[in-house]
Amino acid sequence: MDELYLDNIDEYVNDHNKIVTYKWLSLTLGVHVNTAKQMLYHYLDHKRKESSAQLHATYLVSGKFVDNGQTSHKVSVVREDQLEDFKAKMSLVVSVHVYSVQRALLRDSGPLYAVDYDAVKDNLKNCSRYSAIHCASAVPMSSVELQQAREVQQAPTPEPENKKAGMNGDTSPVLKSSAKPPKGIMGMFANKSAPKSQDKTKEMKPEKKEDIEAPKSKPVAKANPVANFFGTQTSKKPEKPVKEEEAPQSSSRAAQQLERSKPEEKQETVAPVEPQKDTKKDSRSKTKRLEDSDGEEEKMEKKKRRRIKKPEPDSSDEDVIPDSPQPVVTREPSSPSPKKEVEPDRHSHPSSEMKIRKRRRVMKSHTFVDGDGCMGYSLYVYTQALSCFTCLYLFMRNLCIQGRAGIFCEKCVLSKNALASAQLNFFSLRDLIAAFIFLQV
Amino acid sequence: MTTLTRQDLNFGQVVADILCEFLEVAIHLILYVREVYPSGIFQKRKKYNVPVQMSCHPELNQYIQDTLHCIKPLIEKNDAEKVVVVIMDKEHHPVERFVFEISQPPLLSISSDTLLSHVEQLLRAFILKISVCDAVLNSNPPGCSFTVLVHTRDAATRNMEKVQVIKDFPWIVADEQEVHMQEPRLIPLKTMTSDIVKMQLYVEERAQKT
């Protein structure tokens, strides 16, 4: 290999004062990433021997970590001065290579991302040309298959797709399935597989083709039963985006002090984060719908359904009232296990749920800054009935046990107006939304 | 595909908005990289699709925002020639000056649809350059503070003194001591030319800092 590259790298690092990452180098010089890594290593070695200019390097270390008996595989970018410490903590070091070389001592990892951003963006179509990660079955779809896939998705839900603007494409699975409640108990059993595989389709569209075939016929058929199901509520066609569904509900609800705009925006942001867990969630939410269909307003039901869809799977343990696992077992062997965890909670919920529905709950959510200057999310809740308070307390206790929230006031005080209140502090926005939606019912 | 002239105030406002947003991010980043304030008050945020460090301290943020709010009308009218972030040591002698020279071409032409994304790319490069500037600069003595100076064309400051843009946030004419530095060393960082604005960033550094 000729030594010209050493001069090239020297020019980038010293004259232009650039951060040279292996990825940027491979795209700039047109070489395989492993060659780029070796080039950087040799350059570093060469310069260190000469001991001329001061250079700093970062390394990519990957290996196994043991944490409380649990092994995990960790991949990190570390500065050179922290490298040995880091390697010592790992139980097994799988690979170490130079990530970048630069003159400046980087205080944080932000510039490392910024440096590659433009180079990757320019080479988006062939950014993996020099990559070492290959998958033989990951081939781009032919134009015919692409067309078919597009037709399948465009047919059932044209409107939820509108919401894609400003969000990842991944949001559409969640929105779509929440917009398609089942016809009834029997309808649910019949159609349960369709939305689920539809979701999967959306997520894995670029990679797997086999999922596409399954839901092709189903989504179109579903549109009609769903429309009939809602009957009188013509304004709430399932095809409408979730936002519009919320609007009539909020006006009808007693809790008008709710800050509607915020939760809606938050819900939209929650949606893109959940694509991977969709399939699991679907099974549980479907069975939840079964429970709800007894003697409730349709509005409530829709709200509930959406409620289940939106929260994260890990937080839906308390939200979801599991139904008989039979319909679930046939499709997803993994889902019965989360179901079983939820069973114990079931008993406290149905009775309290009934009461909750009839009572008022007023909530305000806002962000706060706690003592350390860290941002958190808090939800201030108060109820007007003692019965509500007990279930509220159970709910909060569950959240605390799961480590997802902190309660600001340990005791919930009953004031003169028989009001019980508490402030829940959440560490993540998702959990706040989940709680918010749950408590609204 | 339209050509606008300087008189089109709407577009002038757009340019001023873009520049002020950028200057806010740049000032925060300079404070972080030059360690004017402890790094604990900074938090990673996203701007121009890359992570940047912004401070969480409310008073500092308010100060920077008020400063830029007052500068904005000057930029709109193309009266601001330079915006300078001066880092001073304990005796209030400047040790470093980050100079943003701004000029706007007389005829603003939006000739391409990708203008704004191109500008974003250029601003991203500025952010990156500031992040690595400590390779070319000597480290500052401890206990530094900072201030922002604006060099204007002609006599635009006369208007500023008459009209207080923000209440209780007066601008005063800078001392000679703050404006000029002894034995400055000039280090250019980045230049950008685009259809809507031309900007140059360089650092004047005092040869002996301690």
Image: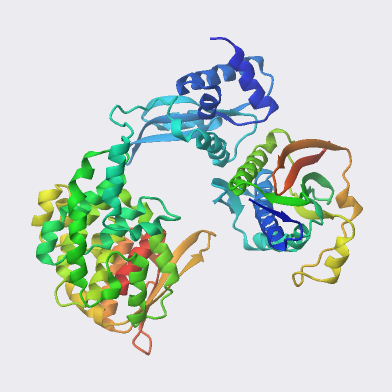
Residue at x 71%, y 38% (from the top left corner): B190
Q: Is residue A138 visible?
A: yes
A8 above or below A361?
Answer: above
Quadrant location of the C terminus of chain A in the rendered image:
bottom left
Q: Position of residue A256 (x, y in %)?
A: 39, 81
B98 above or below A104?
Answer: below
Residue at x 63%, y 31% (from the top left corner): A18
In front here: A87 or B108? B108
Q: Position of residue A330 (x, y in %)?
A: 10, 50
In front here: A287 or A364? A287
The residue furthest right is: B176
Residue at x 65%, y 37% (from the top left corner): B132
**Residue B198 placement: quadrant:** top right
A203 above or below A122?
Answer: below
Q: Position of residue B151 (x, y in %)?
A: 84, 53
Marker count (numbered):
0
